[in-house]
Amino acid sequence: MTDTATPSPSIPARPDGQAVVVGGNRIPFAKAGGHYAGATSLDMLTTTIDGLVARFGLAGERLGEVRAGAVLNHSKDFNLAREAVLGSALDPTTPAVTLQRACATSLEAAWDVANKITLGQLDVAVAAGVDSTSDAPIVVGERLRKVLLKLNRAKTPMDRVRLLGQLRPADLAPVAPNVNEPRTGLSMGEHQALTNLAWGVTREGQDEVALASHRNLAAAWEDGLFDTLVTPYRGLTRDAALRPDTTAEALAGLRTVFGNDQSNPTMTAGNSTPLSDGAAAVLVASPAWAAANGHTPLARIVDAEAAAVDFVRGEEGLLMGGAYAVPRLLARQGLALEDIDLVEIHEAFAGVVVATLAAWASEEFAQQQLGLPALGTLDPARLNVAGSSLAAGHPFGATGARILATLATLLHRRRLADPSRERPFRGVISVCAAGGQAVAMLLEA
């Protein structure tokens, strides 16, 4: 008897499509309370998407999707991505989704749309992120919040007077904004100070990472790398946190700001990322869409991996997710660290880079935590070669898109310089995130 439920062998078991980075756009990142103090997250995200639209001639076009998000969200921005589309030059029938994975938000967005493109569900999409610490939402106390909700439902002026009479002066005090971890009450900086202690991260090691970040970012600006990646905004033409003339001596002279309850604190404002405002976006498409629209892809999105660690019980450091995500990603692809030409490690703090590299090199860590061989020691010449968050700034939701567009452009440049190399130029991104998470992504050109 014939089994009619057996699938036809002619139906492919897996889609074989590809997703490529066509280009990116961001606004220069500003210091909190600086150039963008009067701009909202929606302002910045809309401007950034419009810059991408102008760069690639997409005005009036209906894209498959815009996927974007922020960490610091106002309640009025509950549909941030869709509102940005409606305010942009894109066709208003372009669908949009708002998402959040802390500092990995826009990298997560790129991963999501790349998967849809690979599956053939979309042919082109925008992944983006934004954040403004200058425009952080203010939370009111619980008593005031409940009275305000009742006021909205009050039917008579007397009802409103009675409700307002329930308030005391102390009820009017706002709750100070913060991004401390809800489960521990510790700031990211205090968590990283504990990680630095566990991994023996030195002040000198952190300052060396910070110095390289400023020097590399300054060189990249001078080299014109960002000419096709950044649109000036509100009078700012370069990242405001960049200090091209900083020195090791200047960094060594800064006072410590985190871990000061430890015997030898090491974290300063120089080796920690500044609070920042900004937005970034990436255009992701199928190779066929790129060709049909006359665009040369910068790099292919090969694969991605997310990780989470148990920082609440102290099993691992809050920002050590990249130490897990990248080895798993490379193992799945059958690649070793020496197969990777460029490595981008986002550092909320320089100690993240030092501790992550130490974990990748540790046989003990690899065997006990991952069940994999150690990745080995990374050549510093391959690390964050065009600068990093320490110098550029770190608007949480925008960081992943900034790094993705930069890395894709760097890989494309290398391919243009060496078109005959047989194996691809590969780059990997590691972005740590609040909540003990991280996202890693592999590109090739």
Image: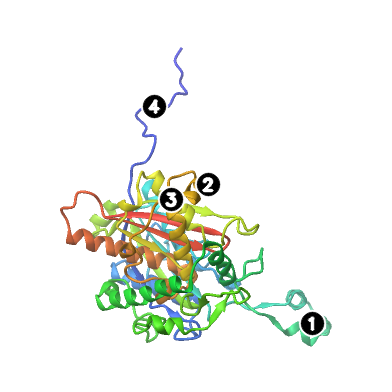
Nearer to us: label 4 or label 3: 3
Residue 45 seen = no
Mark-to-mark CA distance, 2 and 1: 62 Å
Q: Amino acid at mark 4?
A: Ser
Mark-to-mark CA distance, 2 and 3: 13 Å
- Determine which residue is flagged by label 2: 368
Q: Amino acid at mark 1?
A: Arg
Q: Quick one: SS at disc 3?
A: helix
In depth, the one of 165 and 21 nearer the eye is: 21
Q: Quick one: SS at disc 1?
A: helix
- Determine which residue is flagged by label 3: 327
**Cβ atoms under marks 2 and 3 closer than 8 Å:** no
- Determine which residue is flagged by label 4: 8
Q: Picture quarter containing residue 191?
A: bottom right
Q: Amino acid at mark 2?
A: Gln
| First reached walking from the N terminus: tag 3 or tag 1 | 1
Rendered image coloring scheme: rainbow
Residue 159 horizontal/vertical position (percent): 82, 80
Mark-to-mark CA distance, 3 and 1: 60 Å
| First reached walking from the N terminus: tag 2 or tag 3 | 3
Q: Amino acid at mark 3?
A: Pro
Mark-to-mark CA distance, 4 and 2: 44 Å
